[in-house]
Structures are given as C-alpha cells and as structure tokens.
Image (spheres, helix red, strand yellow):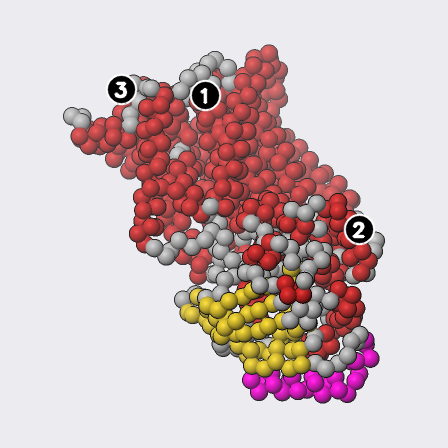
Amino acid sequence: MSAERDIRLAHVSKTFLARGTIFRALEDVSLTCEPASFTALIGPSGCGKSTILRLALGLDAADSGTVTIGGKPPRAATASGATGVAFQDAALLPWRNVEANIALPLDVLGKPRAEFRLRIKDLIHLVGLDGFEHALPGELSGGMRQRVSIARALVTNPGVLFLDEPFGALDQILRRQMNIELQRIWSEIRCTTLFVTHGIDEAVFLADRVAIMASRPGRITQVIDVPFARPRDRTLFTDPKFHKLNDLIATVLHGA
Amino acid sequence: MAPESAARRRLAGLRNLAVLLAVWELVGRLQLVASGALPAPSAILVRFWADLADYPPHVWSTIQSALLGFVIGNAIAIAAGILFVLSPLALRLARGINIAIFALPPIAIVPVLVLALSGMTPRVVLAALGCYFVTMTATVTGLTQVDARGIDLVRAYGGSAWSAMRLVQLRSALPAIIGGLRIAAPNAVLGAILAEFGGGGGRWGLGTYLIGSLGRGDPARLWGIGLAATAIAGLAYALFAVAGAAVIGSSRAVTVPTSASPSLAGSWSGNPAKVAALALASAILPLLLWWLLLKGLGIPDLIAKTPMGVIDYLFFAEAAPRAQERLLAALVQTLPITAVGLFAGLAFAFVLALSSEMFPAATRSLMPVALVTQTMPLVALTPLLVLLLGRGSAVTLWITISVTFFPSFVTIAQGLALVPRAALEVPRAYGASKLTELRLVAVPASLPYLFVALRLAVPRTLLGVMIAEWLATGTGLGNLLNQSRGYLDYGMIWTVAAVSVLLSVVFYQLVVIAERHTLSRLGMRTSE
C-alpha cells in the first residue's frame, strides 16, 4: 500500500518557449516524497514550484528526467484516482453548486456519485461548510471557495495530495485558520502531500520537511527537516523554535 | 429600486415607440417620403387585414423551410465545432470548406441551387448554410475561450479531452453557442426567403409572395410582407436572447484566470511540409465536394458546371474574352462600395456596442426599435429601401450597413458582456470613469470578438451589395448574376458564384492575417 503512495522526481528539466525566448523553468530537479509525508515546496515567484506540480499531475511533460507517482507515470496515476489536487485559485465551475463541484473528480473518473453521497457530506462537514451544499460559487466568500476546493481534492480519498498555494489568495487571519484546519484534516487522512507555497510560516507549520527553490534556472537548493511533533496546534505559531526555523529558511531563501 | 427603474425603462421604450409610430403615421398620411413610398402604419395595417387570408400558407411555408434548415444546419454546426476543438487536424482539413460555406454570399448560389436541386430543398439548404458557420464559430469560440483552470482540473484527474469537453467546455460555451443560435435564427429565415426569391420551391413562401406583389406597386402590401418576415425573424431571435440571459449569469468566471490559457488548438507550426500539405488539402476539399455533389446528383454538364467547367468557360472557351470582360466590369463596380459598406457597418456596430455598455438605459429603450429594423430580413427590406432611396448607390450602402451591423453588434456586445467582473473592478477601484474602464479593460478584452465580428461582416457585406445590385441598382456582380439567369448563361451563373465566393475568401484571409498579427502581439489567442 504505502509503496504506491510516493512521489518521485529524478533529474527533471523543463524549458518553455515564451514569445521567442527560452525560459529554463526547471533544471535537474530531484525530489522524493515518501509515503504519508508532508513536503512543502517554497521559493520566489517564477522559480518553477507550480511547474513541478504540473509535471507531477501530468498536465505538462518534462523535457528530460522521470516523474513517477507510486511507481506509475503521472497520467496513469491520476487516471486511477490515486491523486487529489487543489489549485491556487479555487477553480470551481461557476454553474455547479458546492456538492456538484466536490463531485467533479468523480465525474471525471467515471465513479458513480451515489456511492459517494456520504463521503461528500462528511467532507462538507470536515471543511466546515454545512448548510452550503447547494450554494453556487458566486455566492461564497474566497475562504469558503477554497474550502470547497480542498474538499474536492479529498473526495476520491487520494493517497497523494497536491496543493498549489491553496491559500495564496486569502488574508493572513483566514490563512492561519485554514492552516490549522488543514493540519487537522491532514492528521486524519495522512496522505502523501506536496504543498506549494509562498508562505514560510505555513510551510513550517504544516510540513515534515521544506524544499527550498531558487529561480533562473528553477532548482531545489536545500531541503530542511521540520522536527516538530504532531499533532501541531496553534500554540506552535508562538513557539520560539518555530520562529527560529522560519528565520533559517528565510536566510536560505534570500541567500539563494 | 430595481423593479421601479425597470418599469420606467419599459415605459421609456414604449414612449419612444409611440413617438416613432406617430411621426411615421404623420409622414405616411402626408406622403412626405418619395411620394407615398412610406405608407402610414394604419394604411399598412388596413392592407394587412385585407390580405390576411393570403398570409398563412406563405408564412407557414417559410417557417417550415427555415425551421428545418435551422435544425439541420445547427446540429451539423455544433457537432463540427466540437470535432474541430477536439481535433486540430480536422479543423485544418475542413478549413477550406468552412471558409467557403461561410464566405459564399447566399444570393450568388441561389440560381446554382435552384439549377441543381428540386422542390423545397434549395430553401432548406440555404437556411442551413446560413446557420452553419455562425453557430460553428460560436461553438469553437465558446469552447476554446473557456476558463483554462477548469480544464486543468479535469486533466489533473486523468480526464481525457472528451471529459474536459463534456464536464467543462460544453457548459461554459453555452452562452456563446446560444449567442450563435441567436444570429443563426434570423439567418435561417433570410436564407429561406432568399431561396424563395430566387424561384426555388413552388408557389408558397413570403419571398414568393413578395416577388409576386412587387409588380403591383402597392407599398402598403410590401411593408406588410416585410414586417411579417421581420416578426418571424425577430421572434426567433428573441427566443434565444431570453435563453441566453438565463444561462449567462452562472457561466461568468468567478475570478480572473491568473495564467494565460494553454493553447487548445495545438501547434502545427513544427513541420512546414506537413503544414503545406494540410493547407493544400483544405483548399482542394471544397472543390472536390463541389465536383462530387454534382456528379452524385447526376446533373447534366450543360447546366451544372464543375470547377474545371468554370475554368474552361472563363479561360479556354471561344467566348472567354467576352466573359472576362463582363466579369471585370462588374467587379470594378462592386468592390469599392463593398469596402466602404464594410467599414461603415462595423464602425456603427462598435460605437453602439460601446454606448450600450456606457449608457445601458438609453440603449435599452432604443433597442426594440433597432431590433425591429435589424431583424428585418434583408430581401424583404430591399424593395422598401428602393422605394425610399431610389436606385442609386445610397441604397446599396444602406442595405450593406444594415446587414453587417446586426451580427457585428451582437458579437461585440457579447464580448463586452463576458469581461469578468473582477477585471472591470480594478480600474473602477481607481476611480476610473466608464470610458476609461472600457478603454483599459473591456475593449482590449473583447478584441477577439471584434475580429470575429469583422470576419462575420466580410461576406455579409458582399451579400448586401450583391442583393442591392440584383434588385435595385442593376450594376456589378449581382446584376451580372441576374442577367445570366435570364439569358440561361449557365457558365456565367457558376462563374459569378465561384468568383464571389473566392472574393469573400480572399477578404476573409486578409482579416485572419491581421487578427493573428494583432492578437499574438497582445498575447491573446485567435478563436478561429
């Protein structure tokens, strides 16, 4: 079981051709996320964080190197329903209500919604949206939309979860709240998670280890382990050790 | 507040209509325009009442062929649109056929259709042809201009291109498709009437009725028929306008996509040999289709000219120099007025679309009146305009503007309406005026739609000019076509049809080149 839940990138490179100039988005990136681990990927804008995620999801293809999820190529892994994903923008379909948006991956994978009715109900409860089952995205606040997208990412009961700056558009207070909730949710499900973020504090709070990236060309410069015991709660945010680790990562980021 | 202002708006609309009718009545009673060419509304009503028993079979016949053509044409169009988005190769191959269907001025092929087909078929075919390209383009535009994040999401779960189509693209393309159907509906009516006008398919139909009444010189009856045709086209349009309003609210993207959409069309720029082969194949396909249809229908060579037949007629036959001379003389008359009409119609549509964003209330109260004049099927309008404006180039220009204006306006206004709320709110947050908001966000964001409008307008302009020439001015390509019909000059009939389609295709290609250039500079994709 657990062997099928790792994420492996080996010597991956990717260039883009943007308006005539070659842009080296990733150069020789290797990263392994062990089963049931939580890895945060942090770095400046445009360093290729999201590109790593898109490669792992099979949305783009690498120029060289290999990407596997549970030993399978990305397209095969995603098509088997082993993965879940939440994007920076909630990317909800405006004409589907909360329930139907959460059910979208099921529709894609051809799984009958009826069997997941209870699961969807549980997820709506888990992300704290009871009573909004039939609301349309246009009627929800930014934070609520993002909760829907997290619930949607979890609906297939994935072994591997990809989160691409899921709280990037939220304010700091809401973001903390969502961090604490994600921490709680993740402690229940423990799936292998790759979390792309701009925020040092949320990376440290949530992850087992933090992979730091630099840009031009995009590469991983250092991987730092986060030693704090789980379950973690809000008291961690005020812990001096937490801040020390934050400062260390900030130093590496700026030095890079 | 809202219901009250809605009521007030409706009241203003009614007031404008009442004022217009009163002025019209007065003008008609006093015979102020062209010595009675514009009869008073009451006189038209009286005439209509007297003719009432004549109408039902004509109206029913027109509706039947228009409806059948509408259903067939749009079903093919939507299926083709989906196919083209899923398969760039199919789009490439069908390009020639698409452009030819789109570019053919219906009037130019009426005589050809009547020669080649029998019974009601020319009417249905022309109505279907009138729908195909509009709906196909709208479908492709809607499917490709979709919020890319939704597609990413489906693909992130291993979904195929078809799942993305089914779950995301089709639904979000719905407003665009309905917008297409909205334009296609009056087109179908116009197509059916045009074919009736050209003598296809028996004694019933509003077009036949109109032709039969032309000689009687009774303006009130012509107006009655014209207004009846308008009412049918207008109702068809209104039906889809209401349907469009119902779906657009829930389809607008909730937020602005952060990244440029990935190209859905796929890139074929890689292998020049392959690109050239595809282009050649797509250019040959329509000619092949033309040849196959004629051979398949088994029409004698004397009546039905194949592509080779047309080339022979124009270049190698004994009378070729004479044919060339007549064709060139016609072209010299047709081309300049086409260019002028095209730009006037587009400019008018653009200004009105912008002002409908800026002064929604004022425009909405004028809209019913504009709609009535604009859904009036062109052919029904022409005899009336001739009565009003005489047989000079003024009438050509009016007809041309009135055919290009309507689809351009709908397309541009739709582009403006689809600009995401958040994008508009950015300049608004800096205290921008409505005008600045339009200039900075709405106009650039709707630029792809402006080009679509231009592409739509090109062949319609030629159609307008040719209809005016055929029915009113007695000059140019339209007249040549009409004359050749009279002389049973089959070679010239097919030649004019082919040349006018070719002309439209060339114009169209020029617009496409300009569009590619402009949009790629702005980092947008063409919807073609």
Instruction: Please indicate whether residue A133 sits to the left or right of residue A47 in the image.
Output: right
Q: CA distance from mark 2 to mark 1?
A: 56 Å
Residue range (magenta): A233-256
User: The disc labelled 2 sits on which kind of residue?
Assistant: Leu
User: Where is residue B196 drawn, in percent x and y?
Assistant: 46, 20
Kindly identify which residue carries mark 1: B121
Q: Residue at x 52, y 47 (%)?
A: B141
Q: Nearer the viewer, mark 2 or mark 3?
A: 2
Q: Is residue B366 above or below residue B148?
A: above
Kindly identify which residue carries mark 2: A118
Q: Residue at x 56, y 19 (%)?
A: B59
Q: Residue at x 25, y 35 (%)?
A: B328
Q: Earlier in the sequence, mark 1 or mark 3?
A: 1
Q: Are marks 1 and 3 on the same chain?
A: yes
Query: For numbered disc 3, what is the local secondary structure?
Result: loop
Q: Are marks 2 and 1 on the same chain?
A: no
Residue B32 makes an appearance in the image: no
Q: CA distance from mark 2 to mark 3?
A: 73 Å
Kindly identify which residue carries mark 3: B302
User: The disc labelled 1 sits on which kind of residue?
Assistant: Thr
Q: Can you tell which mark lies on residue B330? A: none
How packed is label 1: few (under 14 Cα within 10 Å), some, or many (20 or more)?
some
